[in-house]
Image: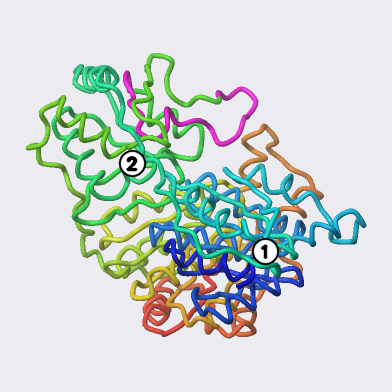
């Protein structure tokens, strides 16, 4: 057994089931090991940012890490944007990055790079495995690191000669350290703030936005009158009719400040407080009012569910009845010229129970949070790190993790073009993904950002860089070229029918919604 085979068997022994890949020459022994062992499901992405984004989507839904296989420094570099997003989401991923044989590095061949230096900014743990007989132990540690709460990115660099040299037997990973809860004193301070009678909120981030965290937070809100808030973008929220509703802080600074203005107390679980996405002239970075005293009850590496249980104990809230989101009123489906609000109305009415929603709608979907609050119960995955190009890969990974759940990806047209090749992987794997592309023919968010920084009348050069017409993108043809079906619509009634067709069609389906 060589080092590569010992690594594959170690990954499988420790619960890794899927490897998203884009391999090269240095990874041939690892690929051969995957072939011989048949221990992992291998999913090919046509660019590394699809591979890393799919691993993120998989882990968010499977609640355990996947592996990636990337080719040397440049291949890893191609996947950095979605590793950044995964890192911000608290996602566990095991990156296996091939490298030149250790003795070949000194010759500075064209693909020689500082792989550890490239990996470090988006990894919580990085190691180059120096010997073939140590690869299995290093692989076990990479899995332990990735599974450490709330999820960590572990990058294991595998030089070619450690892959083909004689390896050791597979190694069982040590158990990750269990996250701890907050101190009793911190809980008492938080309970006092929430029950003060002054306007207060619980600010929730991480796995507390799923059960049992949602119900516990709902009990606390029912007992104290506190609001439930979450960041603008979240790794996953389980939401919809019959679930405890959580309000996302708006992206736009003025809107966020307005929504948070009444607060006197904010208790953070997983994050201390919301802040502005960017700095703007004459606008603050902090969006809480100066009169609000935020306190962090529990950091992201601590046990948020336990913190909520302890708060329920302190507040005697276990028997409180949480408020649940009401189902959407049957108002019929919209008609007429298509716009963002009509897309949201049709989407909210037609979304099936158990769906997974991938939201990279950017500016076009800013109202979706309140418009879809009463939709059938679903999971909502957001772009967490702000680096666009995550949506289609996230949908791909979620589809591998949850093949029996329908997936709807809400995509900006500019964002979609970053990783459009993910449609090919969706077609190859026959994934049940319906993609709605908001085709406004522009980077509309940048037009808004120009205004936000004080430029009210951008000139021709700026406008030309913000528009993605000339030529107009044809997403239906692009999708069909990658093996996915699709259609273009500009009428609300036609959009509703297209959405129904897409969700009923096996495999991927693309709706180009012209707005």
Helix, strand or loop for the magenta stretch, by majority? loop
Please check the rendered image and state whether residue 99 is part of the magenta-colored stretch, yes or no: no
Quarter containing the N terminus: bottom right
Disc number for residue 211? none
- Residue located farthest toward the top when viewing the structure as drawn: 291
Q: Residue at x 45, y 72 (%)?
A: 400
The answer to whether 370 appears left or right of 411 in the picture is left
- Residue 270 falls inside the magenta stretch: yes
- The residue most toward the right is 107
Is residue 515 at all visible to an observer of this figure? no
Relative image position of residue 124 (x, y in whole percent): 57, 43
User: Which of the 4 image quarters holds residue 335?
Assistant: bottom left
Q: Earlier in the sequence, mark 2 or mark 1?
A: 1
Does dot 1 land on a helix, a strand or a loop? strand
The image position of residue 316, as x and y in percent, is 10, 28
Magenta span: 263-284
Residue 514 located left or right of residue 505: right
Q: Position of residue 81 (x, y in %)?
A: 64, 52
In the picture of the structure, the residue carrying the numbered disc 1 is 70
Residue at left offset 46%, top offset 64%: 16
CA gap, disc 2 and disc 1: 38 Å
Circle 2 is placed at which residue position?
Answer: 247
428 over 336 or under it: above or below: below
Going 30% across and 50% down the picture, which residue do you hit?
210
Q: Is residue 266 above or below residue 87?
A: above
Horizontal and vertical percent position of residue 504: 37, 82
**Residue at the spot x=72%, y=47% of the render?**
116
Q: Residues within 10 Å of mark 1 (few under 14, many from 20)?
A: many
The C terminus - image quarter = bottom right
* Displayed quadrant of residue 342: bottom left
Q: For the residue carrying disc 2, how many other residues have a C-alpha within 10 Å: few (<14), some (14-19), or many (20+)?
A: some
């Amino acid at each position: 057994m060589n080092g590569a085979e010992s690594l594959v068997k170690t990954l499988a022994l420790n619960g890794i089931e899927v490897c998203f890949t884009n391999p090269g020459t240095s990874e041939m022994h690892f690929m051969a090991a995957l072939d011989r062992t048949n221990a992992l499901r291998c999913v090919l992405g046509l660019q590394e940012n699809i591979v890393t984004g799919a691993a993120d989507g998989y882990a968010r839904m499977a609640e355990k890490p996947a592996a990636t296989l990337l080719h040397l420094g440049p291949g890893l570099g191609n996947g950095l944007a979605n590793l950044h997003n995964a890192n911000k989401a608290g996602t566990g991923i095991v990156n296996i990055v091939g490298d030149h044989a250790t003795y070949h590095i000194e010759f500075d061949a064209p693909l020689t790079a500082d792989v550890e230096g490239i990996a470090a900014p988006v990894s919580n743990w990085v190691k180059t495995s120096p010997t073939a007989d140590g690869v299995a132990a290093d692989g076990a540690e990479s899995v332990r690191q990735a599974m450490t709460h709330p999820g960590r990115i572990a990058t294991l660099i595998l030089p070619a000669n450690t892959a083909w040299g004689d390896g050791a037997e597979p190694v069982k990973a040590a158990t990750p350290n269990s996250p701890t809860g907050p101190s009793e004193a911190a809980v008492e301070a938080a309970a006092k703030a929430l029950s003060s009678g002054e306007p207060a909120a619980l600010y929730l981030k991480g796995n507390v936005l799923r059960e049992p965290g949602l119900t516990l937070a709902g009990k606390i809100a029912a007992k104290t009158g506190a609001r439930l808030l979450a960041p603008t973008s979240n790794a996953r929220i389980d939401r919809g009719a019959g679930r405890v509703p959580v309000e996302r802080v708006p992206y736009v600074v003025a809107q966020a400040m307005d929504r948070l203005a009444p607060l006197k107390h904010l208790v953070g679980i997983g994050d201390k407080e919301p802040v502005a996405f960017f700095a703007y002239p004459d606008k603050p970075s902090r969006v809480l009012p100066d009169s609000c005293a935020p306190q962090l009850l529990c950091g992201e590496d601590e046990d948020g569910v336990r913190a909520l249980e302890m708060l329920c104990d302190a507040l005697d809230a276990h028997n409180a009845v949480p408020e649940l989101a009401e189902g959407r009123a049957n108002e019929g489906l919209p008609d007429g010229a298509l716009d963002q609000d009509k897309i949201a109305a049709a989407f909210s009415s037609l979304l099936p129970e158990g769906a997974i929603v991938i939201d990279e709608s950017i500016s076009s979907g800013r109202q979706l949070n309140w418009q879809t609050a009463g939709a059938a119960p679903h999971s909502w995955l957001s772009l967490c790190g702000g680096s666009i190009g995550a949506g289609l890969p996230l949908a791909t990974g979620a589809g591998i993790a949850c093949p029996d759940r329908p997936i709807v990806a809400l995509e900006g047209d500019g964002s979609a073009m970053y990783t459009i090749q993910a449609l090919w992987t969706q077609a190859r794997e026959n994934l049940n993904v319906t993609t709605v592309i908001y085709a406004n023919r522009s980077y509309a968010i940048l037009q808004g950002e120009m205004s936000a920084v004080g430029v009210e009348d951008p000139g021709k050069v700026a406008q030309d860089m913000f528009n993605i017409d000339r030529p107009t993108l044809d997403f239906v043809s692009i999708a069909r070229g990658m093996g996915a079906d699709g259609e273009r619509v500009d009428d609300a009634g036609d959009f509703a029918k297209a959405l129904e067709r897409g969700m009923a069609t096996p495999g991927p389906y693309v709706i180009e919604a012209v707005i």
